[in-house]
């Protein structure tokens, strides 16, 4: 059975209406023509989406299981997303709650290149939470950012990432910044014998991205940050599968929030920040942590962590990475909540004591132990 | 004054709370660090977002006017979207209701290359609504799609567009399809002396897109369909500004619906399907028409049409293009509602009488006159 499955939560007043909406999704997401016009044979039998089941849920909504042919998508991630939720994203009361790739798409989309085990191998941290300070703010020059990165690497950071607002601005153009920051992190690693990895943000104009990624690789970047909300999930897939790149990828949630914030629209938190990130090939998925500046609940955050780490998901299990208001004070609570396989972002709180960045990281490490 | 403006509708219980949220947005969208940590000088004075005003609206929400420096974005469209709404997209109760580029971004982002006047010039249709049949469904082979396109061009279609679900699938691979459909439309044009333009869907894997666009141009495509929800708005900008491309662009709303469907999240319909499409450089913006399979109201549809056509908007006025359940029967009502500067999509209803495609288009033309 090589069809892939999408599970939709449908808001309807009764089972008949829910079933009718499910049949509407099956048409909308594939042939996009009225049912009676669908050509007989291959298109009706294979291409047209199939409603496998529709069942009432406890709270009055309905769960619809639809299947689609991989012939609709080929090995194209954007087109897969188009079939999963393209036009249905424009209809109210439909939320994507699950996706299963089936045999054929599992061969086409193999997920993260490194996953949790592969990233741990690169940072030489076989157990425990990883600590990932963020260099910022935008408007800083490259030397200032490199100095922060150097201090963080001396302090034993596992991953040092660009703020997602650092792109190719004149204050710290991509190549200047990446060269200086990568060199600073390498110098700290030489001095300490450590293995901090620098993840620059692959961002700018579309025509520059592959050049930037190649430059980052050659400059000694240890991974990269990608922003699927702005550049599409296909950028993740492209870098995750490029022979010449071969570095771990961290996905940032910017511009994606709207997809999860309404209970009756978009995607569940687990699908957006777990399933789709694994499908695209991210090794680490950033999401806003409970209790920070964003409104995700503990349950929503744990659902993301589960979707990232489940052995049943697409490809290798990946790191969930809670951020947004994370601080050293919360480290022990976070460890109790998420367990060990987590990448903790440290952003603004790190800069509060800019002269003690290394100390802050060592303190966080001690609290996570 | 070269700062650009973003207007947010903020849902808060009083003016103090709304103002605090606005100050939070100013931080979140730029420096992303606590206020007391923001470095003095350039970063605090220029880079940090500024809350220009916060005012109560009639219905209890608040309108906040923020300005940002173009230094935050450079001439990068993805980074501009990142500053407009990146992380704020993950916070509830914030909706983008307006954007004004200011002097410097107006020079960087010049909008549509053709606009309404330029597209009319290419299709030789100086007045009246344009008719744009869609070739579909996916799963059809290239010859079948070419035959539909040929019939549509013979019937006097202005624009013949690929269904947004036609990408690079094995049933009709991009290059095979584009070559055959473009040839069929050219043949019909030669036979009738007409000027139908074929808009193939520039879609597939990211690494193939520029090759596909070049191929389409060389094969005789008269424009292109783009899907910013799947590939990012920067693909539109890239094609709208590429010297070698020089063809009109039609933007499809797939995967973008979630951004507009909640009143308290995302973007207004006018910003998403009018302002942002003009910013990126689309010449025609497709959106789901009132009364079809989608739930947009007449007011929402007209707000999109106004934002597309307003002389005060970014660059040249562009065509609004209502689709999704459009049919010949509705032509006169639609003309009364939208006026003349409209591109009408004709999709599934056209295929209902596949042997009378030309007749349907001529009938529609008569009703629009």
Image (cartoon, coloured by chain):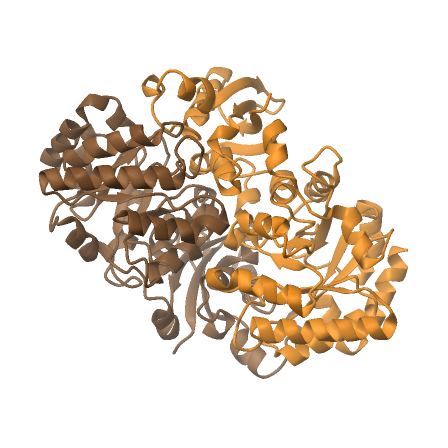
Chain colours: A brown, B orange
Q: Is residue B53 above or below residue B215?
A: above
Q: Nearer the viewer, residue B290 or A358?
A: A358
Q: Position of residue A321 (x, y in %)?
A: 27, 44
Q: Nearer the viewer, residue B236 or A63?
A: B236
Q: What residue is drawn where x is 21% and y is 46%? A: A342
Rendered-image quadrant of the C terminus of chain A: top left
Rendered-image quadrant of the N terminus of chain A: bottom left
The answer to which quarter of the image holds residue B213 is bottom right
Q: Position of residue A105 (x, y in %)?
A: 39, 70
Q: Position of residue A227 (x, y in %)?
A: 41, 46
Q: What residue is drawn where x is 42% and y is 41%? A: A254
Q: Is residue B364 above or below residue A89?
A: below
Q: Is residue A341 left or right of residue B10?
A: left
Q: What residue is drawn where x is 75% and y is 76%? A: B354
Which residue ends up furthest to the bottom in the rendered image? A41
Q: Position of residue A327 (x, y in %)?
A: 23, 30
Residue B342 visible in rendering: no
Q: Is residue B147 left or right of residue B109?
A: right
Q: Is residue A210 above or below residue A160?
A: below
Residue A1 visible in rendering: yes
The answer to which quarter of the image holds residue A275 is bottom left
Q: Is residue A333 left or right of residue A231?
A: left
Q: Is residue A39 left or right of residue A194?
A: right
């Amino acid at each position: 059975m090589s069809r892939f499955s999408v599970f939709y939560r449908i808001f309807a007043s009764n089972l008949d209406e829910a079933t009718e909406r499910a049949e509407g999704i099956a048409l909308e997401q594939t042939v996009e023509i009225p049912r009676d016009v669908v050509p007989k044979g291959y298109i009706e039998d294979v291409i047209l989406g199939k409603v496998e089941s529709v069942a009432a849920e406890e709270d009055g909504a309905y769960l619809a299981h639809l299947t689609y042919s991989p012939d609709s998508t080929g090995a194209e991630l954007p087109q897969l997303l188009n079939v999963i939720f393209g036009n249905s994203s424009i209809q109210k009361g439909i939320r994507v709650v699950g996706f299963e790739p089936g045999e054929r798409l599992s061969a086409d989309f193999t997920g993260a290149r490194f996953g949790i085990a592969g990233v741990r191998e690169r940072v030489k941290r076989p157990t425990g939470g990883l600590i990932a300070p963020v260099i910022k703010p935008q408007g800083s020059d490259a030397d200032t950012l490199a100095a922060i990165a150097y201090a963080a690497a001396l302090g034993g950071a596992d991953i040092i990432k660009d703020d997602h607002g650092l792109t190719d601005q004149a204050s710290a153009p991509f190549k200047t910044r990446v060269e200086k920051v990568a060199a600073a992190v390498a110098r700290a690693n030489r001095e300490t014998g450590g293995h901090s990895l620098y993840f620059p943000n692959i961002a700018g104009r579309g025509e520059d991205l592959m050049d930037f990624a190649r430059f980052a690789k050659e400059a000694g970047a240890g991974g990269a940050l990608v922003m699927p909300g702005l550049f599409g999930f296909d950028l993740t897939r492209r870098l995750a599968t490029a022979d010449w790149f071969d570095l771990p990828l961290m996905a940032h949630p910017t511009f994606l929030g709207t997809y999860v914030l309404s209970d009756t629209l978009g995607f569940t938190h687990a699908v957006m920040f777990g399933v789709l990130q694994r499908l695209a090939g991210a090794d680490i998925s950033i999401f806003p942590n409970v209790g920070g500046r964003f409104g995700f609940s503990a349950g929503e955050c744990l659902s993301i962590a589960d979707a990232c780490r489940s052995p049943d998901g697409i490809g290798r299990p990946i790191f969930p990475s809670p951020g947004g208001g994370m601080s050293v004070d919360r480290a022990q609570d976070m460890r109790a909540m998420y367990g060990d396989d987590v990448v903790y972002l440290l952003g603004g709180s790190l800069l509060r004591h800019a002269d003690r960045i290394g100390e802050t990281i060592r303190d966080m490490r001690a609290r996570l132990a």
